[in-house]
C-alpha cells in the first residue's frame, strides 16, 4: 500500500468548560503507516506527570484527550501532532475555563429541504453553550454515526451533517440534540430525496386508412384509367362502339 502523510479529517475544536467539569479534545486522523500522536499544552508535552488524571487514547484514527476535572490552571492552547515516515501534521485549539454557565442555544437551526437523488446534502446548525454542548444528529430517532456516507463535521459553533450521495431511503425527520450540564436544546427538520423520474417513451403516430377509403381510392384510379382511354391524347377522338361497351360493362362491376 502506498504511504500517505498524516491528515486531519476532523481537526481539534476549542472547548469552553465549566470549572470542575470534564473537558474533551478529539480529532480524526488518516495516514499510512498509522501515525504516532503527541499532545502539547502551550508547547509542553502532555503526560500523566505533567497533567495528573489526563486520559489519552488513539484508536482507528480517532485521537482523544480527556481532562476529568478542569481548573483554571488547565486553560491554554492544546496541540495534537501526528507523525509517520511520510510526514507530519498538527492541529491546535483553545481550552477556556469559566465559572459561568449557559444552556445550549441554536443560533442557526436545521432547515427542511428537498434534494435530487444522487446529490450531496448538507445539514447545518450553529450551537452555543457553556460548557460546550455535546451535539448529536438523528434520523427518525436513530443516532447517526460519522462515516464515509454520513460525515459529521464540527468547526467552532458550526455542526454539519453531510450525506455524500443521497437516496430516497435517506428521506425522513432529522434532528440535532445539543446537551450540556445545564440544559438541552433540539432542532428538527424534514429531508425529502426525490427519485429519478422514469422516462416515458413517446407514442408512435400511426396513420390508419379505412377499408372504405381504400375502396374509394381504387375506384377513382380505375375510372381515371378508363377516361384516359378517351382523353389521354392531345387530340380528342370519339371512342369506338366496342370501347364504349367495354367501359360501361367495367364501370357497372366497379365496387
Image (spheres, grey):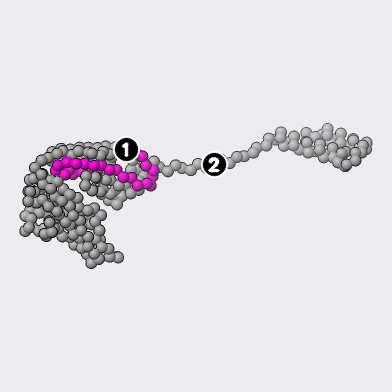
Residue 142 visible in rendering: no
* Disc 2 secondary structure class: loop
Q: Residue 18 appears in which quarter of the rendering?
A: top left
Q: Residues within 10 Å of mark 2 (few under 14, many from 20)?
A: few
Q: Residue 122 occupies which quadrant of the picture?
A: top left
Which range of residues does the magenta coloring cover? 112-137
Nearest the viewer among 219 and 153 is: 153
234 horizontally vs 91: left or right: right
87 left or right, relative to 20: right
In the picture, the disc for residue 184 is: none
Marks 2, 1: nearer the viewer:
1
Q: Main secondary structure of the magenta part?
A: strand
The x and y percentages for residue 108 are 25, 39
Does the magenta portion include 132?
yes
Which residue is denoted by mark 1 in the rendering? 112
Task: Give the structural element (helix, strand or loop) at label 1.
Answer: loop
For residue 255, what is the image quadrant? Answer: top right
Residue 17 or residue 161, whichever sits in front: 17
Q: How many marks?
A: 2
Residue lying at 23% horizontally and 39% vertically, measured from the top left: 107
**Label 1 crowding class (10 Å Cα cut-off): few <14, some 14-19, many 20+?**
few
Left or right: residue 28 compared with residue 255: left
Q: Earlier in the sequence, mark 2 or mark 1?
A: 1
Residue, disc 2? 202
Alpha-carbon distance for marks 2 and 1? 36 Å
Give 242 or 128, whichever is nearer the viewer: 128
Q: Position of residue 35 (x, y in %)?
A: 21, 62
Residue 75 picture location, percent across and down: 10, 50
Instruction: State the residue at coordinates (78%, 36%).
Output: 220
Tell me which residue sits at (17%, 52%) in the image: 93
Q: Are marks 2 and 1 in contact (CB under 8 Å)?
A: no
Amino acid at each position: 500500500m502506498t504511504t500517505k502523510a498524516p491528515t486531519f479529517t476532523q481537526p481539534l475544536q476549542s472547548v469552553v468548560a465549566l470549572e470542575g467539569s470534564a473537558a474533551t479534545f478529539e480529532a480524526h486522523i488518516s495516514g499510512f503507516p498509522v501515525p504516532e500522536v503527541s499532545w502539547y499544552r502551550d508547547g509542553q508535552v502532555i503526560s500523566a506527570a505533567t497533567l495528573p488524571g489526563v486520559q489519552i487514547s488513539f484508536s482507528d484514527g480517532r485521537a482523544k484527550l480527556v481532562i476529568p476535572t478542569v481548573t483554571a490552571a488547565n486553560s491554554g492552547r492544546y496541540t495534537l501532532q501526528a507523525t509517520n515516515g511520510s510526514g507530519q501534521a498538527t492541529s491546535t485549539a483553545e481550552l477556556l475555563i469559566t465559572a459561568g454557565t449557559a444552556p445550549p442555544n441554536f443560533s442557526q437551526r436545521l432547515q427542511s429541504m428537498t434534494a435530487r437523488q444522487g446529490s450531496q446534502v448538507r445539514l447545518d446548525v450553529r450551537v452555543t453553550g457553556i460548557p460546550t454542548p455535546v451535539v448529536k444528529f438523528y434520523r427518525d430517532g436513530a443516532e447517526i454515526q460519522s462515516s464515509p456516507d454520513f460525515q459529521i463535521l464540527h468547526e467552532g459553533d458550526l455542526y454539519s451533517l453531510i450525506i455524500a450521495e443521497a437516496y430516497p431511503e435517506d428521506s425522513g425527520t432529522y434532528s440535532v440534540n445539543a446537551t450540556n450540564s445545564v440544559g438541552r436544546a433540539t432542532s428538527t427538520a424534514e429531508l425529502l430525496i426525490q427519485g429519478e423520474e422514469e422516462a416515458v417513451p413517446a407514442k408512435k403516430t400511426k396513420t390508419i386508412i379505412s377499408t372504405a377509403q381504400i375502396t374509394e381510392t381504387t375506384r377513382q384510379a380505375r375510372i381515371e384509367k378508363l377516361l384516359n382511354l378517351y382523353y389521354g391524347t392531345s387530340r380528342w377522338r370519339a371512342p369506338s362502339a366496342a370501347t364504349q361497351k367495354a367501359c360501361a360493362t367495367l364501370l357497372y362491376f366497379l365496387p
